Amino acid sequence: MKSRQTSTPTVAAAASGFARATAYRIEADPRLPSQKKTPRGRRRPDPLAAVWESEGNQESLLSDARALFGAIEASHPTSTAESVGHGRIEKRVATVVEAPGIAEHHEFEGLKAF
């Protein structure tokens, strides 16, 4: 809106090819719409916040998880899914492993075993 330097907002808007209301809006706040956005936070509280915040437990939790998954047997229930798209093949494997006592060993508030 260079013509605004010498003309009224109405004349400058007409010369630029947009509405008079847009000219007044730009004059009130010349920032781009992308610069006006405020960062959006979480809508719901993180259910695993206690896990992420307790960094002291991370190493022991990782070693316990490796020990549990290292002893996977053929008798454990497993589900495999493959999908092809975007030029790649994705393979997902989910295994259910019992973890008796792991919830008591790692004291995470609000985290419950099922």
Image: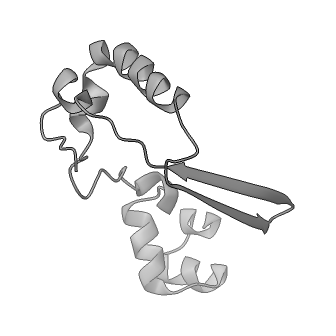
Residue at figure coordinates x 79%, y 66% from the top left: 84
Outermost residue on the right side: it is 87
**Can you say which quadrant of the picture contains the N terminus?**
bottom right
Of residue 46 and residue 111, the one placed in the foreground of this image is 111
Image height of 97 relative to 13, above or below: above
Q: Which residue appears at 64% of the width and 85% of the height?
A: 17
Expressed as whole percent of the image width and height from the top left, the position of residue 11 reads 55, 82
Q: Position of residue 22 (x, y in %)?
A: 46, 78
Residue 86 visible within the image? yes
Q: Image point 54% across, 52% down: which residue?
A: 94
Say which residue appears at 50% left-offset and 32% top-offset: 69
Which sits in the foreground, 37 or 112?
A: 112
Left/right placement of residue 43 relative to residue 27 reads left
Q: Position of residue 73 (x, y in %)?
A: 55, 39
Extreme-front residue of the structure: 75
Left or right placement of residue 26 versus residue 108 in this view = right
The number of numbered discs placed on residues in the rendered structure image is 0
| Location of residue 4 with respect to 14 vertically, above or below | above
Q: Position of residue 19 (x, y in %)?
A: 51, 87
